[in-house]
Amino acid sequence: KKKRRKRQNLSDLTSTYDRTETFSTFGVRPASPGINHASCPTEPIQAEEGDDVTLQCHVDHSVNLTKYTLDFTRADLSKKIVHAYRHGKDDPDPQMSEYRGRTTLIHADLSRGNMTLLISSVQMSDTGQYRCFVLDLAASCTIVLNVGESAGLNSKFTSLKSHTVKKFVPKSDGCDLKKCLFLI
């Protein structure tokens, strides 16, 4: 009876995560279902056209992601690839042409369970849902990015419907508010 109860609990746990194909590369074994999952900011990221933006997903800090297959996709565009990381390096082949030369995956963060993607010079067309996905762990989460016209603090944002709002906090060192905003 105890074994049955454990299976049932694990099954309940895995049903809450997005489970798709699971296979391994580089001999990395998929983790037990439901044990590792990705977490993303729950609030949309607001940016002005021309800004550089950081998208970050996190898996448990003890998971070294350097040998895993990682994708950042546009979930709202039939999961087209924004950035791909395969066999220990960036793979530009499947990347959407709109993002070529504008994305950088921070490799140093991978060993700490973080997937950090920089998108430089964002455009209005970059507004959307970004999914980060660790294929071997079947772990994913979604980040919403809203890009507005560059017009100072009175920018107009093209907004995707979301149940969350991004907070901006000014730095306290007395610098110009527009130049000193950072995301928490």
Image: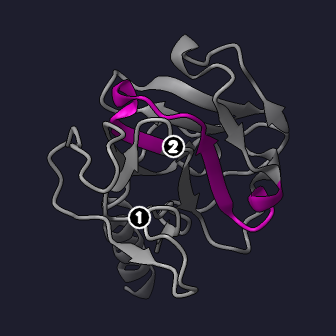
Disc 1, SS: loop
- Residue, x 59% and y 52% (percent of image)? 137
| Picture quadrant of residue 16 | bottom left
Task: Residue 141: give x, y in percent of width and height.
Answer: 42, 53
Q: Is residue 121 magenta?
A: yes
Quadrant (top left, top right, bottom left, bottom right) of the N terminus: bottom left
Q: Residues within 10 Å of mark 2 (few under 14, many from 20)?
A: some
Q: Nearer the viewer, residue 142 or 4?
A: 142
In three-dimensional space, the C-alpha distance between marks 2 and 1, rounded to whole angstroms, equals: 19 Å
- Residue, x 59% and y 65% (percent of image)? 59
Residue 61 as seen in the image, left or right of residue 164: right
- Residue, x 52% and y 80% (percent of image)? 171
Task: Residue 119: give x, y in percent of width and height.
Answer: 58, 39
Residue 3 as seen in the image, left or right of residue 125: right
Task: Residue 71: give x, y in percent of width and height.
Answer: 59, 36
> In the displayed structure, would residue 182 be above or below residue 85?
below
Q: Is residue 154 magenta?
A: no
Disc 2, SS: loop
Q: What type is the residue that disc 1 sits on?
A: Pro
Residue 109 as seen in the image, left or right of residue 32: right
Q: Residues within 10 Å of mark 1 (few under 14, many from 20)?
A: some
Q: Which residue is mark 1?
A: 41
> In the displayed structure, would residue 20 be above or below residue 79?
below
Which residues are the magenta region? Answer: 108-131
Q: Which residue is mark 2?
A: 51
- Residue, x 46% and y 74% (percent of image)? 184
**Residue 18 visible, this angle:** no
